[in-house]
Image (tube, rainbow, N blue to C red):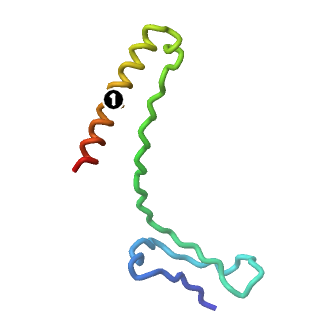
Amino acid sequence: MIDFIMVNHRFKSIITACRTFQRADVGSDHNLLLAGIRVKLRKIPKKPVTKRFDVEKLSDLTLRAQYAEHIEKKVDVIRKHQGSAEET
């Protein structure tokens, strides 16, 4: 019995070697088939590290006030932008 490796025509070039083992005890009338393949692996880009905030600094009252003022300014800019978008 002849055993085959079925490969799509597109991937035909990745098979580098093919060999059968006639005497392998696999409990079947088929022959054990060994194939060498060439695989090109792509590098997976790493996810950017999320910025961690030091919340212990908020226990300092002056830093807490500065942070609240900074956030309030950003919220005001967003509100003004949304207000001008709604008027048009």
**Farthest residue, direction bottom:** 1
Left or right of 74 in this view: 15: right
Name the residue at 43% across, 50% down: 44
What is the quadrant of residue 83 in the picture? top left
Name the residue at 43% across, 8% down: 62
Q: Quadrant of the N terminus?
A: bottom right
Name the residue at 53% across, 11% down: 59
Q: Position of residue 71 (x, y in %)?
A: 38, 25
Name the residue at 32% across, 36% down: 78
Q: Position of residue 43 (x, y in %)?
A: 40, 51
Residue type indicated by callout 1: Lys
* Residue at which label 1 appears: 74
What is the quadrant of residue 12 in the picture? bottom left
- Of the pair 81 and 13, the residue shown nearer to us: 81
In this view, 77 is above or below 38:
above
Left or right of 62 in this view: 33: right
